[in-house]
Structure formats: structure tokens, C-alpha cells
Image: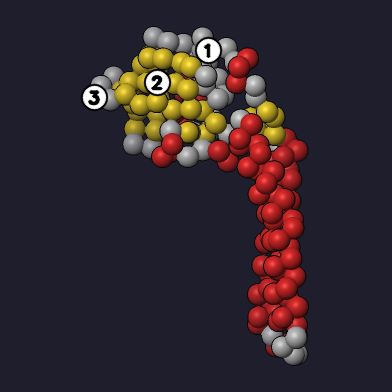
Amino acid sequence: MAEVAYYTRDGLDRLKEELQQLKTSGRANIAKAIAEARDKGDLSENAEYDAAKEAQGHHEAKIARMEELLATARLLDESKLDSSKVLALSKVKIKNTKNGTTMTYQLVSESEADLKSGKISVSSPIAKGLLGKKVGDTIEITVPAGKIEFEVLEISR
């Protein structure tokens, strides 16, 4: 069974919209490509037909993955989150104790992660190190570049 993933309302809505698009217009586009390739003659030597059938397989696999994601998705009510410690969907302001740089991240599900907008996956090394910590805690987190020490400055929803 797949791991449970926690989503914001926006993230869950986007996932549902994408799945709906794949099931409707996405499938229709692939069926059209297969029909056009089939009309071009002998299927045993038709590379275009083979490519369209392969694309259909990839498309259906993506739909199956997204359906599995939705089946294990849980919506978190951000208004009920405890902001005394870092949890999924928390916004955390941290400081690198070595160079004094501060960063603010929101811990979100894997599919909602977007570093440019400050959203990191709860399964990332930094997020894993922050989960359960409180304001004032100092933690050492191992990242690809080595070990970095952070201080938790602020936690909000």
C-alpha cells in the first residue's frame, strides 16, 4: 500500500483537476493519435502506431499512479494544526547557525513541493529533521552537501 500523503485544499484540488483532464481530453487525444496511425496502413510496420500505443500505456500508468495518490491522500485542516511544533503544512522560519542565513519553508506533500515558492516535501532531509521540533530548538541536519546546523526561529500555519 502506498504511503499516506497530506495535502492542502489547493493541492488536493489541483491533483483532482489534473486526473480529470488526463481521463477526459488526455485519453481522447491518445485515441485520436492511435486512430490516425491505424489509418496509415499495415500495423505490423507502422512505427507511428507503435509509438501511439506506447504513449497510451504511459498515460494509463500515470492515471493509475494519480488514482493511487488520491486514494491515500488526506486533507489537513490548517486551522487545527498545533503551531507549537513543526508538523506537515507548518511554515517554519529557520536560521543556519554557521552563516546566519534565514529561510522560511512550508512542509508539504511530495507533489506540492516547489522550492521557488518555499514549499519543501515532508520527505526531504531538511523537513524530516524539522518535524516535531519547537521554536528555539537547534538541530543538525545531514543534506547532500554535508551537515548543517539550524535553529528554529518561528512556526506558523
Residue 78, position in %: x, y?
Answer: 60, 21
Q: Which mark is residue 93?
A: 2
Q: Is residue 67 left or right of residue 129?
A: right
Query: Label 1 neighbourhood size at 10 Å, few (<14), some (14-19), many (20+)?
Result: some
Residue 153, position in %: x, y?
Answer: 38, 14
Dot placed on the residue nearer the N-terminal end, 1 or 3: 1
- x 38%, y 37%: residue: 144
Name which residue type carries label 1.
Ser
Residue tagged 3: 99
Classify 103 as above or below 55.
above
Dot placed on the residue nearer the N-terminal end, 2 or 3: 2
- x 61%, y 30%: residue: 8
Query: Label 2 neighbourhood size at 10 Å, few (<14), some (14-19), many (20+)?
Result: some
Residue tagged 1: 83
Name which residue type carries label 2.
Lys
Task: Tell us which disc is closer to us: 2 or 3.
Answer: 2
Q: Secondary structure at mark 1?
A: loop
- x 73%, y 63%: residue: 27
Which image quadrant: the N terminus?
A: top right
Structure colour scheme: secondary structure
- x 39%, y 9%: residue: 136
